[in-house]
Amino acid sequence: MADTLTTKQNDPAEIKRLWAQRNLYSQAKRVVGLQMALTTLVPVAGMIAEVAWPQLKGGVAFYGVVVSVLDVAVLDPWQKGMRYLAAKIQEAFDCSVLDLPWNDFKVGSRPEGEDVQAASSARRGNAEDEGLQNWYPVIVAEVPLSLGRIICQRSNLRWDAALRRRYRTWLAGMLILFGVIVSYLGLHTGFSLEQLTLGVLAPISPMLLWGIREFQRHGEAASLSDRLREKSVAMWTAALNRKMSEEELKARARQLQDEIYDRRSNAPMIFNWVYNRLRDAGEEQMNVAASELVTEAKSHGF
């Protein structure tokens, strides 16, 4: 049974891994926020300032060059390095809890204990975060491990897709708001096309481009999670109909886990304030769905 899964996920060593990956992702998100501020917000302010003080034009251009180099040479590799390490530590957690073999070819070497300790030591005081307890639905303890593993992977993928689509909704709202502002200025202020372009569109274009790019990237990531979830559904159906052995199900779960690791390593990140606002509702939905799957498994004699 999968009771070993639900018990092991709360072991101190596994909680440390969750702390580590959470802190690394949080640090990476802060760097992304810095990148956004340096490459969009500050240039917007600079372009607006140029209107009042034309002598700043040279300084703003120099700033743009310096920030572009800093972003590509330092900030982007920095946040990607933290994101990859976080994904690798989370992979170690999943392999341990879901009883899956480590794939050196896909993931590389296991994260070193010193890296996990350094990342997890950023926790506040000695208090445990209840959000890290019972990372996967505890109800999977009532079914065999081969089925519980599929439920956990499916829950992971469904939660990711739902979260990203909610985030895209917020991004779409921001883009629409910008469009309304520009339309209002164009229709009701008497701005000429040149004034509207240079005074409004040019300053906010970096933010618009960032919003459009993030909207598209999160849509692609959500679609990928959906496609992977479809694979987990196919595995689930095969398992219920006893068309695969335990060994075959484990091998297929390992293949699916490879795709999950790739998604974690490369997908755009969502800021913590968004994640925290949506987490409770997402966890409730995850537990309800897991309960329904467990009931379905029992109806098939498991």
Image (spheres, rainbow, N blue to C red):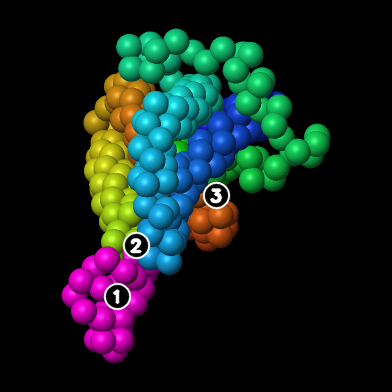
Residues drawn in magenta: 171-199
- Return the residue at label 3: 272
Residue 182: image tag: 1
What is the C-alpha distance between the residues marked 2 and 1? Answer: 10 Å
N-terminal of the two: label 3 or label 2?
Answer: 2
Taking the spot 56% from the left edge, 12% from the top edge, the residue there is: 112
Q: Position of residue 54 (x, y in %)?
A: 38, 59
Which residue is the extreme one toward the front? 55
Looking at the picture, does residue 110 appear above or below residue 196?
above
The local crowd at label 3, few if under 14, some if 14 to 19, many if 20 or more residues have their Cα within 10 Å, is: some
Q: Does label 1 or label 3 sit earlier along the sequence?
A: 1
Q: Amino acid at mark 1?
A: Val
Which residue matches tag 2?
204
Q: Disc 2 vs disc 1: Cβ atoms closer than 8 Å? A: yes
Asked if residue 92 lies left or right of residue 154, the reply is right
Which quadrant would residue 10 be assigned to in this image?
top right
Which quadrant is the C terminus positioned in?
A: top left
Between 93 and 300, the residue placed more toward the observer is 93
Is 86 within the magenta? no
| Residue 50 drawn above or below residue 200 | above
